[in-house]
Amino acid sequence: MRDTKVIAPTLLDWYDRHARTLPWRVPPGGGAADPYRVWLSEVMLQQTTVAAVKAYFERFTALWPTVQDLAAADDAQVMAEWAGLGYYARARNLLACARAVTAGGGFPLTREGLRELPGIGAYTSAAIAAIAHDAPETVVDGNVERVVARLFAVETPLPAAKPELVALAETLTPQERPGDYAQAMMDLGATICTPRSPACGICPLIHDCDARAQGIAASLPRKAPKTAKPDRTGIAWVGRRGDALVLEQRPATGLLGGTLAFPSAHWDGRDLPPPGAADWRAVGHVRHVFTHFNLSLQVMVGDLDAAPARGHLVPLRQIDREALPGLMRKVWDMARAEIAA
């Protein structure tokens, strides 16, 4: 490793010229960032790409421009707007956090204070403190892990390497402009120091990278072999009565928590009956990948003999496909031709 003291100034100079334009970001030298927008974007970006998040962020901030607006929002509307982003515990924590921030008079200024809020962990608290409050906190996401692993040629596989990578990243965090530096590291990982085929030739840190000097940059960070995901099966019922379908609110916690969905069973640990008596007919299977398992869900369609025993009837004209979670969109797409028949 070369002189680590030059890394932050070199990277900040690069960032001043090449920073990405993002809807939640204040450009270099543009003043303090709004902690609400920083927090909202960071929560949305967890396990989701920047490209996917942009439209959601713009819609959320148009509907709820401030954290107080979000705190006062209807839970069902927020869950519906979140549909498609996945990992629905984030949406539940989003509301809980907005209400805690509003009750407390605003976002805490320190990383420690931010960690007290619902759904805010080590990474998000550091990001808000650095980017919104310019505190010299070290922000380490997947992009930063990759950059640091290459700069220091860390060959220990992830996730075991995480503590070492965080400790090394802390040695680079500057006291001046830590918020811009944090975003510069993220941008470097997202645009140049990419997972495959890193563009070392145009990297501002080309002369400071041990992995590049050793010719192993593209192979880092190493990752431990993944274990195979288990398979699960289940059943979903699309029940019709008149010009309405049966939908239900899923439990607040657990898979697809708090979302509007077609009644289902078995795949999520719940052994529940169909929503009512009907001449149920199978129309096919949909497949969906969750973080920890693969799912095959049999889709059943039928006309109910009476009012549903679980869930409630929603007029067909009021069903918004985009308000359903991804799995249930697949169910609806498979069933709708039968429903229309």
Image (cartoon, rainbow, N blue to C red):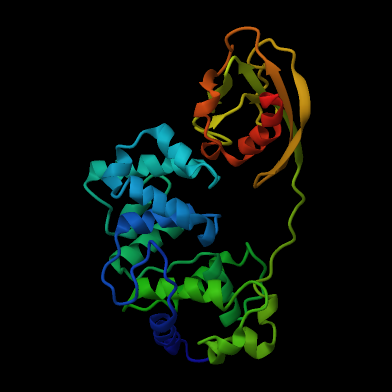
Query: Taking 76 as reference, is 253 left or right?
Result: right
Q: Residue furthest top?
A: 306
Residue 100: percent from left, percent from top: 30, 42
Q: Residue at x 67, y 17 (%)?
A: 274
Please state the horizontal and vertical placement of residue 81, each as a whole percent of the image. 45, 42
Q: Is residue 256 above or below residue 276?
A: below
Q: Horizontal placement of 56 versus 107: left or right?
A: right
Image coordinates for residue 96, horizontal then vertical, percent:
37, 40
Q: Position of residue 291 (x, y in %)?
A: 65, 47
Quarter of the figure that contains the N terminus: bottom right
As drawn, 227 above or below 272: below
Query: Closest to the observer: 186 or 73?
Result: 73
Rendered residue at 28%/49% (across/down):
66
Q: Residue furthest front?
A: 341
Q: Quadrant of the C terminus?
A: top right
The quarter of the displayed image where residue 102 is located: top left
Quadrant position of residue 233: top right
Q: As drawn, is 316 to the left or to the right of 289?
A: left
